[in-house]
Image (tube, grey):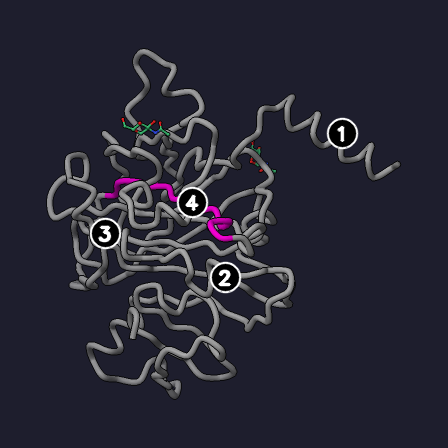
């Protein structure tokens, strides 16, 4: 009976607040400068919404992109996204903070960040030409079933996430694609929920790093081992913070990375879990840095 009442109460609250999806990035902060994002829950209803650094998208319900849309343009920068009309100025090496609303984020899952060079103005670039490379990707941090996920770090930081723009990134205009993947229903086909959020950055730097990327429509597949799985029962291995561009860097230079012994290990889903297939990935396994490149 108590459980029934609790369920009823939850339904009532859900109806009352009209919650369907789970959020968007309200703003970013770079070097103490606040840049407003695109608010999909209010801007569509304003006659003259402000010019912001966040891409326009049709997620008026604060909702998500489903795995069955991974090969559609909606996965690039969310549903029916169109270019942001503004951009934030960033120096290579700066950190970007994302503020998600509403607080708190409700679901476990990874947090990922990608960049794509616009090769021109991001305000007018054709989004279907953008090639993304990952600069940050965190999944499971400790424990299992469900364990402690990147999303828990975000929640503990009042729904914020910080990513560093690579220090040696080449000067240029980039789309920063920040994404949470909610996995609470991922055991069902098309049960994972992707929340991609895009921002225009004008990056200045002295470096020459230009990683190759892939089209967003090639990032994920519906049945990927980190997308279709039961977070509450499946065996997991830990994944720590890594930067794929460092991996790329190492591969380019054929040097050891940070003096650590590096094992380049081919695709092995049973041993190495989660996101190894996302566009060049490195992470620590025991004391080794393990690197993959794309879908080896
Ligand atoms: C996206 O655009 C298409 C074509 O105009 C439209 O049918 C669809 O309803 C739009 N999606 C959303 C979520 O607004
Ligand atoms: C947490 O984030 C919300 C939403 O941006 C903000 O209103 C609130 O002041 C923040 N709380 C703290 C303690 O920073």
| Distance of label 1 from label 3 (alpha carbons) | 44 Å
The answer to whether 105 is drawn above or below residue 108 in the figure is: above
Q: Answer yes or no: do the residues labelled 1 and 3 have beta carbons within 8 Å? A: no
Q: Secondary structure at mark 3?
A: strand
Give 42 or 74, whichever is nearer the viewer: 74
Q: Answer yes or no: do the residues labelled 3 and 4 have beta carbons within 8 Å? A: no
The residue depicted at 57 percent of the width and 52 percent of the height is 108
Give 68 or 201, whichever is nearer the viewer: 68
Q: x%, y% of residue 113? A: 37, 53
The answer to whether 174 is drawn above or below residue 262 in the figure is: above
The answer to whether 111 is drawn above or below residue 249 in the figure is: above
Label 2 belongs to which residue? 139
Q: Secondary structure at mark 2?
A: loop
Question: Label for residue 9?
Answer: 1
Query: Mark 1 against mark 3, which lies toward the viewer?
Result: 1
| Distance of label 1 from label 4 (alpha carbons) | 28 Å
Label 4 belongs to which residue? 66
Q: What's the magenta region?
A: 189-201
The residue depicted at 29 percent of the width and 69 percent of the height is 294
Q: Answer yes or no: do the residues labelled 4 and 2 have beta carbons within 8 Å? A: no
Q: x%, y% of residue 192? A: 49, 50
Q: Answer yes or no: do the residues labelled 3 and 2 have beta carbons within 8 Å? A: no
Which of the marked residues, 4 or 2, is nearer the chain's N terminus? 4
Query: Mark 4 against mark 2, which lies toward the viewer?
Result: 4
Label 3 belongs to which residue? 116
The residue depicted at 15 percent of the width and 35 percent of the height is 124
Query: Mark 3 against mark 4, which lies toward the viewer?
Result: 4
Query: Mark 1 against mark 4, which lies toward the viewer?
Result: 4
């Amino acid at each position: 009976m108590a459980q029934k009442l609790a369920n009823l109460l939850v339904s009532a609250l859900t109806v009352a607040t009209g919650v369907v999806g789970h959020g968007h990035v309200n703003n970013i902060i770079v070097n103490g400068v606040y840049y407003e994002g695109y608010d999909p829950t209010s801007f569509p209803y304003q006659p003259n919404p402000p010019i912001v650094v966040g891409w326009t998208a049709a997620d008026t319900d604060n909702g998500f992109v489903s795995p069955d849309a991974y090969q559609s343009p909606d996965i690039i920068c969310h549903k029916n996204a169109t270019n942001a009309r503004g951009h934030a100025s960033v120096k290579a090496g700066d950190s970007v903070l994302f503020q998600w609303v509403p607080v708190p984020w409700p679901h476990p899952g990874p947090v990922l960040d990608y960049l794509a060079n616009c090769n021109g103005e991001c305000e007018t670039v054709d989004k279907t030409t953008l090639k993304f490379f990952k600069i940050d990707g965190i999944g499971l941090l400790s424990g299992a079933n469900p364990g402690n996920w990147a999303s828990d770090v975000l929640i503990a930081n009042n729904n914020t996430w910080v990513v560093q723009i690579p220090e040696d990134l080449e000067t240029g205009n980039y789309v920063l694609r920040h994404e949470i993947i909610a996995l609470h229903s991922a055991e069902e086909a098309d049960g994972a929920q992707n929340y991609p959020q895009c921002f225009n950055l004008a990056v200045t730097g002295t470096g020459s790093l230009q990683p190759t990327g892939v089209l967003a429509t090639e990032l994920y597949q519906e049945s990927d081992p980190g997308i279709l799985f039961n977070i509450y029962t499946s065996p997991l291995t830990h994944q720590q913070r890594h930067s794929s561009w460092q991996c790329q860097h190492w591969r380019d230079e054929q040097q050891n990375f940070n003096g650590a012994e590096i094992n380049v290990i081919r695709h092995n889903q049973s041993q190495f879990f989660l996101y190894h297939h996302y566009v060049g990935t490195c992470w620590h396994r025991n004391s080794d840095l393990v690197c993959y490149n794309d879908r080896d």
